[in-house]
Amino acid sequence: MSATVTDSAIILSRVPWREADKRVVFFTRNHGKIDGVAVGAHKIKSKLAGHLEPLRAVDVMVAEGRQGYKIAQCMTYHNFVDVEPDISRVRCMGILVRFVKHVTEFGHSDPELYDMLFRGLALMQATEISELEGNFGQSLMNLAVHFGYAPTFDRCMLCRSEENLSRFSPEHGGMICTAEKVFEKTFIFNGFSPQIVVEHLKWRGLV
Ligand SMILES: [Zn+2]
C-alpha cells in the first residue's frame, strides 16, 4: 500500500531527472515542501508536462513510492506567468520562489506561508509596472519577516547607535553608523529599497 498526497501547490522548481524524467519541487498548502518525480515528462505526449512549469499554482496528487514521491496528477489552476511575460515581473517572482525554496524544510506545513507566497506572486503579475519594485520589496520583506530573516534598519549593528546610519551591511544584516570602520561590502542607504533586502538574503545564500 502506498500513501498519496493531494493538495494545492505552487511549483518552486523543475529539473531534468534521470534520462526522461523531471524532478519537481512543490510548496503545498497543507503538506509544506515536497518533491516528486514525473516519469517520462520529457516526452512530448506527456499530459503532465505542461502543468509542471515553475510559477504555477496547481492541484497535485503524488503517490509515495520506494524512492520518494511520483507525480500522479497535476492540473494548473493559476499560471502566474502571462503568455507574453514581462521579464522584470518574472525575475521578481523567481526571487520570491527561490527564497521560499531555500528556507523551508521538506514536509513542514505552513498554510499561512502558502497564502503569502500566492499573494506575492499574484501581485507581481498584476501590479502596475511602475509599482513593481516597491511591491516586490514589500513582498520579499514580508517573507523575510515570516522566516526571521528581516534586516535591521533602526540601529547600528556594531554599536547600537540609532544615529548617523548611512550604510547597509549585508554581512551584518543591518545598518552601520558613520563612526565605524568597515571593510566588507556595504551599500549607501537612502531609505528602504528592494535591492538591500535582496543583498541581505543573497549574502546568506537564500536567494
Ligand atoms: Zn556604530
Image (cartoon, grey):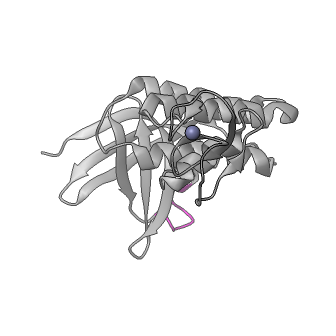
**Was residue 44 drawn as part of the magenta stretch in this picture?**
yes
Q: Position of residue 112 (x, y in %)?
A: 44, 23
Quadrant location of the N terminus?
A: top left
Q: Is residue 55 visible?
A: no
* Residue depicted at x 53% and y 55%: 203
Task: State the predominant SS element of the stretch in magenta.
Answer: loop
- When the figure is inspected, residue 15 is found, relative to residue 186, above or below; the finding is below
Q: Is residue 114 visible?
A: yes
Residue range corresponding to the magenta coloring:
41-49
Residue pushed farthest front? 179
Residue 24: x and y in percent read 44, 54
Total marks in image: 0
Q: Is 51 above or below relative to 166?
A: below
Q: Nearer the viewer, residue 105 or 175?
A: 175
103 left or right of 166 in image:
left
Which residue is outermost to the right?
Answer: 130
> Where's ligand 1: which quadrant?
top right
Q: Position of residue 94 (x, y in %)?
A: 62, 49
110 vs 34: above or below: above
Residue 82 x, y percent position in the rendering: 75, 42
The answer to whether 144 is drawn above or below residue 83 in the figure is above
- Decide whether residue 174 is among the magenta residues: no
The residue positioned farthest toward the bottom in the image shown: 19
Is 86 or 5 nearer to us in this picture?
A: 86
Of residue 79 and residue 91, the one placed in the foreground of this image is 91
Nearer to the camera, 184 or 163: 163
Name the residue located 75 percent from the left edge and 32 percent from the top edge. 134
Residue depicted at x 27% and y 46%:
63
